[in-house]
Image (cartoon, rainbow, N blue to C red):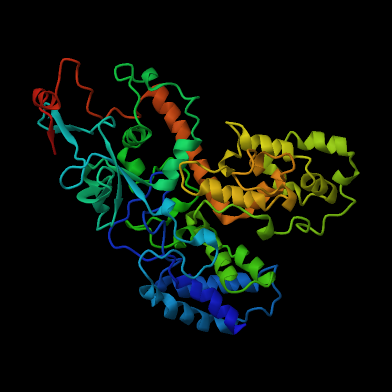
Amino acid sequence: MATLRHTLLAALSLPLSTPLMGNDELCSLSAMRPFTAGPWLLCKADDTADIAAIILSNLLSSPYLPPTTFRPRDLENMANLLIEKHSMWRKLHFGERFPWLSDPSTQKWDGFEDFIAIGHFSEDGEAPLLHWGDEDDGVKLYRRPRGRECIVRRVNHRDAWCAFPLYWDDEVGKWQEGWSVISPYNGNTNIGCLKAPLMYLKAWIQWGVLPPRSYAFPHDPEPLSVEAELYEIVNSRDTAERENGALGLIDYGGMEINFHNYYQDTYKLAWDKYQSTRHLERAIRDGMSGDDLMIALSRDFGAWMCVRTDVWPTSSARGPLIHLNDDCHSTSAFHSLPTEILVSILSHLSVHHYAPLLSVSRSVRYLCLNGVFDATVKHEILVADGSLRWILPVTTMSGEEEAFHAACLTWLPPSRQTSPNECSVTPIHQEHFPHFAFIREAWMQDSMRNRRRLWSITKQFEQLWWDYRTEGWRNDVFVPKPLPDEDSDDDYQSEDGLEAH
């Protein structure tokens, strides 16, 4: 038991990654800060004693654990352990992700390492507001640079206050000196996002369904890049709506709650909302130890929202499919219904409700696990507007197609397993692939759970894109387009008194 206590509670103050100094600016598409890919601690040292007390109270009252698992007198020792272990992060290497976990989804990944800056970068890296005349009372009016002229660059080596001193130059193939400031403060309009959420947004939004830009902007109809339109969508919102880089009207699954006083250091604020330890309790009940307990504890804190999203479930790693609920009896109302009626009833439900049905009764569970709904699940995965399309790999993300294919092969019998070059039909398209079981396991896995979170965020941005393409800017705050007879930007600026501020 002493080993269990040490393993569990030391995890609270062990870092998830190495911290960086300075103000945090969040990714607009995931609400994660760059490079550390979210918070680097579950909680700070000052909070460990109080959190240890709550954890212990939850464990003592847990319906999953016998009353002798933990004793109240252990509390003081547990709290001291938390504080003692808090400084261990200083011994870690720079940029190391989740060094104390063996789960592949917690490891370092370029999808959450590369940060993309979008905007206008002057010598000091900021995109200042532009002077656009004066009001009668002498108050100067300012407008924001437009998206059409914005620059997209990969940045690295954060300094302070969201400032990046280096950017990647594709033409010369190396890092160049040049500041990129990503912050809405002081009128700066530059935004930033992590590589993976941006690639997912480009792949998951149904661009063919959206109206053309010319519908809302007849005087500036030429298409813009996705990044340029994202820049205008974000910057046309009220400043208060994007105070920390994330948009206030977007539900980021709770990740945004962890931003406090300009920093996203810990997961404590999100954990405070529920103070749940249900994953930890179940892990202890199931006899888990070591990394498995740490993963369970970090899951209770919401750290699953920052794990890499390219680790698909394998058949060998799946949880129990048959023993989800041993208490469901053959006397249930569903059990007495003919199979045809059951299928008819269940066919009216969304695929998102299938997994919970496994605990309704043995007969329903049998139907779910024996291919009755595989065709429905397969359809939702493969069609363009399917609700499960997030499970498919995104071709612009390096390595996703190979990882997806390898994971899917484990769900087929050996006689049907082939390499990508040996068969033109991928496993997910094959008739005998267990689509329902695959999706159910993905639903329970942290990596795919975070992938679903990014899918949900993308779908919210898709609605913002629809509004942008049909109604234009939320607020008209951008510099107007030059008239056709204004040949140069210099002439344009001098004629209208446009100057940087």
Q: Residue at x 74, y 42 (%)?
A: 432
Q: Quadrant of the N terminus?
A: bottom right
Judge whether 85 appears above or below 495 on screen.
below
On the question of residue 302 being in view, the answer is no
Q: Residue at 47% x, 33% y: name it.
A: 462
**Total numbered badges shown on the rendered structure:** 0
Tell whether 114 sits left or right of 371.
left
In-front residue for pair 176/69: 176
* Residue 283 position in % (x across, y down): 64, 68
The percent coordinates of residue 199 (x first, y second) are: 44, 41
Q: Position of residue 198 (x, y in %)?
A: 42, 42
> On screen, 26 above or below 468?
below
Asked whether, in this view, residue 337 is left or right of residue 356, the answer is right
| 221 versus 360 height, above or below | above
Where residue 486 sits: x, y (%)?
Answer: 15, 18
Residue 453 seen from this side: yes
Of residues 51 and 122, the one drawn nearer to the viewer in this rendering: 122
Residue 160, quarter of picture: bottom left
171 lies left or right of 359: left
**Quadrant position of the C terminus in the picture:** top left
In the image, what residue occupies the spot 58% across and 82% down?
3
**Residue placed at 47% from the left, 77% from the top?**
82
In the drawing, does residue 206 fall left or right of residue 122? right
